[in-house]
Structures are given as structure tokens and as C-alpha cells.
Amino acid sequence: MNITQVYLTTDYDTSDNEERARYQNETTYIQLFVEECLRKNKVVLGAFNRLVFSEGGDSTRDFNVVGNNALPVAISDTRGELYTLESERDFHDYYIRKLLEGFQKFDEHFKSTFVSNLKPLISAKYEGGLNYEKQMASKPIDGQRIQVVGSYDRKSFKLLVNVYTKKELLKSIPIFECEPDMFIVKYEAHKVEINDKSIVVINKVREKTLEREIAEFI
């Protein structure tokens, strides 16, 4: 199976639901980029397509496929450090360190080269900003280009309306925001449609999450 998903989480047996959800949400913007890298390279190493790096997990369960094609890999429990961190970069560096710790252990087991390949990609990706963006929709209107982008960072998910003239970004306006929980995002902002008059955000059951007039942006 192609490895298409990577989860960085706390151990289910030693953390409560709130702590675990917060940890997973705060690392979503990193997870999505790493998954993008894996999909491009179509990595196949066994009967699993999900890697679960569990901070404080039980190492006796490592590398045994569980559940829905998931491969657990325990990493060291240093969660106490999170209470001492202050800046967004501090949190980012912590989560990257834990992710690479998981991949290092994975490399040693499978004799693979994830860390050496991913480390420079991750460094380059987050050198400028600590977020992950995905284009949801784009349309040329009246000589400008309207683009709607989903942007994850550690604390939130935002839908941004970007307005371009040629390649110049004129403005970037947030129109929707929620916590960076992929399940919430995939439900509430499942699809974005742009026509000559409006931008419509549609949820998973084909209901309008919101609608904004194009005239607000150009």
C-alpha cells in the first residue's frame, strides 16, 4: 500500500481526549505537508498506508499493523516541554523534532531514508511561514484572479480570498475560520465554488456554509 497518511499524536492510554485532540490539531499543518511529500513519491513498504507516531506510546506494539491499515511507532514522551514553550517557532521546532524522531525509528526498522529526504524539504517549506495552504478554487474575473485558499497553522484553519492582478497579490481576506481539526474542516469547508457574482462554501452534505459577494473583493 502507498503510505498516504501520517499522524503525530499522544498515547491513547496516557493522555485524555482533550490533550490528544489539541496535540493532533496543532500538528495538522505539518502532517498535511509531509503527506503531500509521501504521495508524490508513492512509498510502499508493507500492508499499511498510515503511520501513527505516538508520543509516550507502547514500544512493544511498534510495527504491528493495527486497525484500518495503521502502523504504530512509539516515540519518547517529552510532553512536559510543551508547557515551557512560548513562540510559534518553538512549538513548531518541537513538533518537527518529534516527527523526525518517529521517522528515524521507522528508517532504522525498514532501512529507509525518510529523515534524510524529508528534513531539507521541511526546513525549506517552513523557512518563511508556519502554515500549510491548499487552493480550493480559482477564477478570473474582470481582469483579476480570485483564488480561495485553505490555510492551516498551529491554532486555526482559515479560508482566505486572495485577489491577484497577474502575479501580484493585491489583498488577502479571511472569510471563514475554525479550529485546525481536519474532520471539522472537511465537513464545513468541503467545497468552494466561485462564479461571476459570488463565492460559495459548501459543506459535506451539500449545504451552504457561507456565501460572499464578489463585489466585496474587487
Image (spheres, helix red, strand yellow):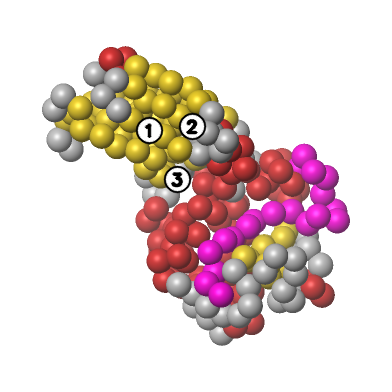
- Determine whether label 1 and label 2 are within 8 Å by CB: yes
Determine which residue is flagged by label 3: 132
The residues colored magenta run: 1-19
> Within the image, what quadrant is residue 47 found in?
bottom right
- Determine whether label 3 and label 1 are within 8 Å by CB: no
Magenta span has 4? yes
The residue drawn where x is 79% and y is 73% is 61
N-term mark: 3 or 2: 3
x then y, percent, for residue 169: 24, 31
The answer to whether residue 139 of the structure is visible from this angle is yes
Quarter of the picture containing the N terminus is bottom right
N-term mark: 3 or 1: 3
- Determine whether label 3 and label 2 are within 8 Å by CB: no
Secondary structure beneath disc 3?
strand
Above or below 204: residue 125? below
Q: Does 151 sit left or right of 21 as displayed?
A: left
Label 2, residues with CA under 10 Å away: few <14, some 14-19, many ≥20: some
x then y, percent, for residue 146: 27, 30
N-term mark: 1 or 2: 1
Determine which residue is flagged by label 1: 193
> Within the image, what quadrant is residue 101 found in?
bottom right
How much space separates mark 1 and mark 2, taking CA atoms? 8 Å
Determine which residue is flagged by label 2: 202
